[in-house]
Amino acid sequence: MAQLNLTPVVWIFFLGLCLYTCPTSAQLSRHHYAKTCPNVENIVREAVKKKFHQTFVTVPATIRLFFHDCFVQGCDASVLVSSTKNNKAEKDHPDNLSLAGDGFDTVIKAKAAVDAVPLCRNKVSCADILAMATRDVIQLAGGPFYEVELGRFDGLRSKASDVHGRLPQPEFNLHQLNSLFAANGLTQTEMIALSGAHTVGFSHCNKFSKRVYNFKSKSGVDPTLNEKYASDLKSMCPRNVDPRIAIDMDPTTPRSFDNVYYRNLQQGKGLFTSDQVLFSDPRSKPTVNAFASSSKIFHANFAAAMTKLGRVGIKNAQNGNIRTDCSVL
């Protein structure tokens, strides 16, 4: 960043502008279904809206599903595939067992709505439906609208063994986060922007309990945690708590897709080590401060990062297909 002689805020804003000026992937197009299913985005949006009004969990569940899909074998809907007696699929890897069912249900309902239109039946990939649904839940929760590039094909493979080491873990430090995201062509700034999705996320207690009960410190509590927040976490997640209990990752505005996540980090209220390290590490702190200071800067960068994430490992007609059932290869 320093080599460019730009302040963090200005440089980050320039990255956000990339959303409108960067070239798209050669295969992807915002108008991919203009002839085969011209109303596809409205069809998906209406189905997602119905699901959203049933439960807010639709928002974090769908976003997380998209991320977990793209980071393993690319954005090819392989995470949606069900296991068979001869194949243990991605969704049954331990790192994916906590994916909420409402995310899968959102895609299933959107796919059914698309296929109910004769012109569109079996023309739109599950991967594209997931990408559109993700954009829609983000906007419904108050986040930015962005154009979704379309034209992905669905993957022909889904194996639990492919998931190992491909997804960020709650205890990751900045180097580990940067390495994992770089492996998918994403920069540190894009990683920090995408982490902002935790503004509407939730987590089971066992994912962070070590920070409040078994940390290597005199008190047993991670010193980077806000004391009052640590106390609140202990109240919500007592020792030996029911493993099904989950809490909001943003204790302030959990149902709003906003930049409060970054303000929470400034106050020591990052739930995971991998959240709080973004502020505690001086290499990433300026970006957190920039996003905390401006919703406009955060939204622009988040939208640009989501667009770039959506290009990871896409499949074409040679190494993919369009599934008639998203859960079956």
Image: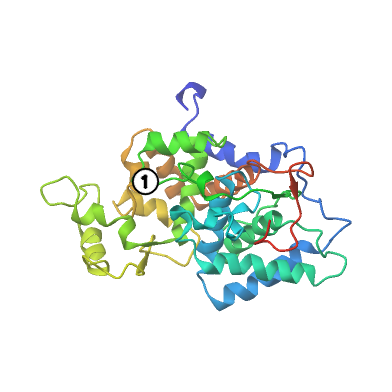
x and y percent of residue 227 in the render? 20, 56
x and y percent of residue 318 in the render? 78, 41
In the shown orientation, is residue 100 left or right of residue 39? left
Dot 1 falls on a residue whose secondary structure is helix
- Residue 49, compared with residue 175, is above or below; it is below
**Residue 47 position by quadrant:** bottom right
Q: Say which residue appears at 46% left-offset and 49% top-offset.
A: 195
- The amino acid type found where label 1 is placed reads Ser
Q: Given the current orientation, which residue lies at the most extreme bottom position? A: 54
Residue 9 seen anywhere in this rendered image of the structure: no
x and y percent of residue 176 in the render? 40, 36
Q: Given the current orientation, which residue lies at the most extreme front position? A: 86
Q: Say which residue appears at 28% left-offset and 51% top-offset.
A: 268
Q: Say which residue appears at 83% left-offset and 70% top-offset.
A: 117
Which quadrant holds the C terminus? bottom right
Q: Given the current orientation, which residue lies at the most extreme top position? A: 3
16 or 93, which is in the foreground? 93
255 or 321, which is in the foreground? 321
Residue 185 seen anywhere in this rendered image of the structure: yes
Q: Say which residue appears at 39% left-offset and 33% top-offset.
A: 175
In the shown orientation, is residue 315 left or right of residue 303? right
**Residue 17 position by quadrant:** top right
x and y percent of residue 98 in the render? 45, 61
Q: Given the current orientation, which residue lies at the most extreme left position? A: 218
**Residue 119 position by quadrant:** bottom right
Residue at mark 1: 274
